[in-house]
Image: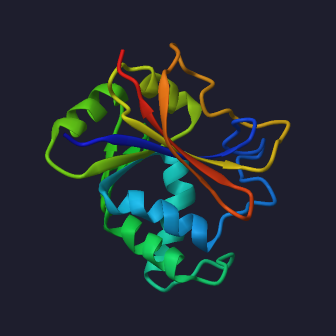
Amino acid sequence: MRKIVVHMQSTLDNRIANAQGAFWEPFPWGEPEVAYVNQFFRTADTWALSRVMYDAIVPWWDGVATGQLPPDAPEITPAFAEFAQLQRRMTKVVFSNAMQSGDGRIVIRGDLAGQLAKLKQQDGDDIILSCGPATLGPIASTPGLVDEYLIAVHPAVITAGPRMFDRLSRGLALELVHAEVFDAGSVVLQYRAIPD
């Protein structure tokens, strides 16, 4: 069966963005970090994202993949180029009440946890899940739905912004699978969800 793997970037105090909805500075995320995370994207064929995450991530990386670099793009290293191609080949599932399906994306609305459970039962590779707390809370609170968490923790603490697990309705028991520490200061933590 496919796994659902939550992948998020976070500050040390568990915030996924600042009050303006952007990443914090400094944001130490370069070649070794991207190369490490790429191994998880290689084993997935679907990326489920909230509309906000989709709009912020996919067009930017599609530009890198097609050689139409966004104005704010850094030097495109081999790991960045690989990530761009990996994400481009993935089916995108977007959670949105307004967006329509098309352009390589499937849009779902309503009972997101139920629809993800059905998607998980289908043939295919793993599903990466990236979304804010309003969406993640109900999904992560559904017993047995999320299998793993791949959380990149950055060496920053910020005073405002959404926290990753703000909307949980029940606690989560997790088992540490691996912790990868990077010289720039980030740590990528891989946790397995312990079944109830």
Q: Is residue 124 left or right of residue 180?
A: left
Residue 92 % position (x, y): 35, 54
Quadrant assignment, res 148: top left
Q: Position of residue 52 (x, y in %)?
A: 55, 47
Front-lying residue, 157 or 84: 157
The residue sitting at 49% across, 60% down in the picture is: 37
- Residue drawn at point x = 64 percent, y = 51 percent: 187
Furthest-right residue in view? 159
Tell me if I can see residue 110 in this picture: no
Task: Classify 71 as above or below 86.
Answer: below
Please give left or right for residue 176 compared with residue 110 in the image: right
On-image quarter of the N terminus: top left
Residue at image coords 57%, 82%: 77
Q: Position of residue 57 (x, y in %)?
A: 53, 60
Say which residue appears at 24% left-offset and 52% top-offset: 125
Residue at the outermost left position: 123
Picture quarter with the C terminus: top left
- Looking at the image, how many numbered discs can be counted on the residues? 0
Q: How is the image coloured?
A: rainbow
For residue 146, what is the image quadrant? top left
Q: Is residue 55 left or right of residue 183?
A: left
Any part of residue 121 in sight: yes
Q: Is residue 8 above or below residue 25?
A: above
Q: Is residue 18 above or below residue 24?
A: above
Q: Position of residue 79 (x, y in %)?
A: 51, 76
